[in-house]
Image (cartoon, coloured by chain):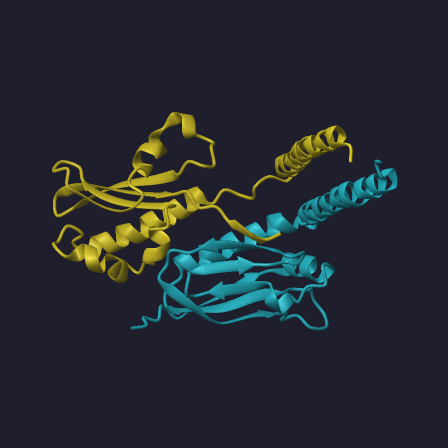
Amino acid sequence: MLNKRGVFWDNLTINYVVYFILVFVFFIFAFLYVTSFQDGEALWEDFYAKQIVLALDTAEPEQDVWIDMSQGARIASGNKFDVGKMVIFDNVNNLVRVDLGKGRSTSFSYFNDADVVNWSIESPSKGGGAEVTRLYFKVVEARKDG
Amino acid sequence: MDKIGGAGAGMMFFAFFVLIMIVGGGLFWGVNAFFGKGYDFRQTEAGLMNMKIERCFSQNDFFLEGFNESFYEICGLNENVIEDGSHLILVRNIVGGEEVLWGVGDFENQCDFKGGKGNLDFPVCKKTELKKGGVDFVILTGSRQHSKKLGI
């Protein structure tokens, strides 16, 4: 004799729970993807990564570079993201990574054979004047390990 | 258990999966169409590479035997980045035809391809001609690099 009660619970437990989990996972990814474009975050990450690479590719050894990142700092602060970690330089892979929060970051490679040292995010205007946040870094000759 | 009903319910999973793909694809396309892919850096990068190579070429003989091994160090370029499949550096003797090449050689054809204009998957090239020692050379640099997204 068919156990109809068992069949009912079997369908409910397996089918609907699986569908629910899949829909929930899809929703989470879609939500994170769409919100990464909020405040133009993705666009500004792309812009800053390329502007920093532009400076790096044209820089000479021992050159100091400052880049205004006030807009990026505003977006990162809004995302409760540490402004000091907006930019990461990867000297091993010649990569610049810009992260303004929301779990995604943007990277771009530079062809200049140079290393970046002493980088920091600074806010020179304290008390009076416009809010300015800028990235500072120094370009040096690439270290040759061997 | 009703096996006929079970088989139908199992097949509906594929229909559900296709629906998720369509919705997800539409969402991705719509957001990218509205917000765009950022600004195009290929022309700028090709121009910067060209400037650097022109300066290096004016101070060194690229066609000297053995120069190839020390090209990256002498001209201050990173080999891993130039050989990553998104860049081209080509220097050619216009009359003699001798050439030296680093990166993706096919970019020379792809840059000239009219169907590739406006297509972000094609490279953008910068060409300059110069005279060195009474000989005409052409320097061609190309870039197809785009920014990469990491994380979700």
Q: Position of residue A95 (x, y in %)?
A: 46, 59
Where is residue A1, by image quadrant? top right
Q: Is residue A53 left or right of residue B74?
A: right
* A109 shown above or below A87: above
Task: Looking at the picture, tell me which residue is in the foreground, B93 or A24.
Answer: A24
Task: Looking at the picture, tell me which residue is in the foreground, A104 or B114.
Answer: A104
Q: Colour of chain B?
A: yellow
Where is residue A109, by image quadrant? bottom left
Task: Looking at the picture, tell me which residue is in the foreground, B3 or A35.
Answer: B3
Q: Is residue B147 left or right of residue B142?
A: right
Where is residue B116, by image quadrant? top left
Q: Position of residue A105 (x, y in %)?
A: 58, 56
* B117 shown above or below B32: above
Task: Looking at the picture, tell me which residue is in the foreground, A80 or A63.
Answer: A80
Q: Quadrant of the N terminus of chain B?
A: top right
Identify the residue shown where x is 63% and y is 70%: A123
* A61 shown above or below B149: below
Q: Position of residue B121 (x, y in %)?
A: 45, 37
Q: Position of residue A78 (x, y in %)?
A: 73, 59
Identify the residue shown where x is 18% and y is 52%: B62
Q: Is residue A126 left or right of residue A68?
A: right
Q: Is residue B149 left or right of residue A129?
A: left
Q: Residue furthest right?
A: A5
Number of marks in picture:
0
Q: Colour of chain A?
A: cyan
Q: Residue furthest top?
A: B115
Q: Residue furthest front?
A: A1
